[in-house]
Image (cartoon, grey):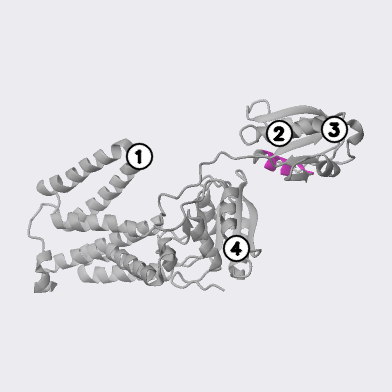
Amino acid sequence: MEKHTVSASLTDNTKYMNRALPVKKSFDIIERTLIIGGQNSAFYFIDGFTKDEIILKLMDSFLNISADDMPEDATSFSTSCIPYVEVDILGDFDSIFKNLLSGVTCLFIDGYEAAIAIDCRTYPSRSIEEPDKDKSLRGSRDGFVETIVFNTALMRRRIRDPHLIMEMYEAGTSTRTDVALCYMSDRVDRELLTTIQNKLEESKSQDLKMSQQSLAEALFQRKWYNPFPKYKFTERPDTACACLMEGKVIILTDTSPSALILPTSIFDMIEEANDYYFPPITGIYLKISRVLITLLTVFMVPLFLLFMQNPAWIPEIFRFVLIEDTVNIPLIFQILILELAIDGLRLAALNTPSMLSTPLSVIAGIVMGEFSVESGWFNSEIMLYMAFVSIANYTQPNFELGYALKFMRLLLLILTAIFNLPGFLTGCLIVILCITFNKTLSGRSYLNVKLN
């Protein structure tokens, strides 16, 4: 929309508003006329975003203003006649449209060359509860929600320090989504902060239709051939605050219940909230266990395939791992089919009604497990190892990292099946290179993120 300033004529202002906005077509954009102190006025607000009780109290207060008490300009009116806290004066229609469509009530009064914005909005939101994905045994039970103001309040409640800065930005030329940049001014990496601020200001994204993920893609264009994530997401306010105290930067996006943490290393990806709530020795043990299990999910099945292709390499004490039963399908195809089947079961679980999830899981377990082995499709050893891999993936909380490790495992399997030991070694080298050369937003190595 072109730049256009507010005039002193209420008629001109309402004509422009009604021409630029579908007031007559959209039922939720409401215009309410009123006489305040002998002057004609008009309210514009979005139905569903406005607190009716506050609007009624404001209108009751306005109706008690006499003509002699009317100030000369909008600024004086906002300070002496509006018994409310969040009030602003807007002089151009671009700002008015942005605030109005965000839920702010805009008031035009005849004779005033500005609109009065009264922020008495409220967004539909769910209750604050612990996130399903990132649970803690001893930590707090609250979590981020889809309303950005609630999320910033959860963080401010934990960090009562004047150095905690929360800057507000706008992203998306169509959606104009609110984005909050949070950091500790005395601990943050200034170079990284400047980089993020410039990227947020220069972002030319058309919209943030997928909320935080769209913003992440706009901030950093990842290389498609490197699946390792460059960001860490969390839905826990305590985890976000712990990262702030470490000097990291948190980005919150309206309509998203998760915080984006920058910068992120591979070591941050494998951390979870429980690591902070237990004694140091317990936390270290949990981290080591998680790292070992994560490595097993990547290398165990390819190593098994390698030894099955070279049974002479297996020591006598481990000869029991050899597959004795013969099936018609080669091992590599058994593994690839099961990899696809596990993802299919996971997708089916997401779309299964909760009342049917348990019986369907039992049926799937029986059919995929016992019957598939008895029918000769799969070996029982392959079923065992793939079951371990599918369960072990949930030991680390990052969903994107889980799929990155899955792609690395598939690469190892295919190279091992085709080229035997040279293929396995080449695959291991590719995994190491993908991790080593994966750069963070600050340009530093994925294996080492330096903070102030």
Crowding at label 4, few (<14), some or many (≥20) Cα neighbours within 10 Å?
Answer: many
Crowding at label 3, few (<14), some or many (≥20) Cα neighbours within 10 Å?
Answer: some
Helix, strand or loop under label 2:
helix
Tag shown at residue 65: 3
Q: Is residue 317 visible?
A: yes
Question: What is the spatial separation of the Cα atoms under label 1 and label 4, in whole angstroms?
Answer: 38 Å
Residue at the outermost right position: 68
x, y percent for residue 171: 61, 50
Residue at numbered disc 1: 351
Tag shown at residue 183: 4
Crowding at label 2, few (<14), some or many (≥20) Cα neighbours within 10 Å?
Answer: some
Question: What is the spatial separation of the Cα atoms under label 3 and label 1, in whole angstroms?
Answer: 57 Å
x, y percent for residue 339: 26, 53
Helix, strand or loop under label 1:
loop
In the displayed structure, 284 sits above or below 112; it is below
Residue at the outermost top position: 24
Label 4 with label 3: CB-CB less than 8 Å: no
Q: Nearer the viewer, residue 232 or 335?
A: 232
x, y percent for residue 48: 61, 33
Question: What is the spatial separation of the Cα atoms under label 4 and label 3, in whole angstroms?
Answer: 44 Å
- Screen quadrant of the C terminus: bottom right
Quarter of the image for residue 189 reads: bottom right
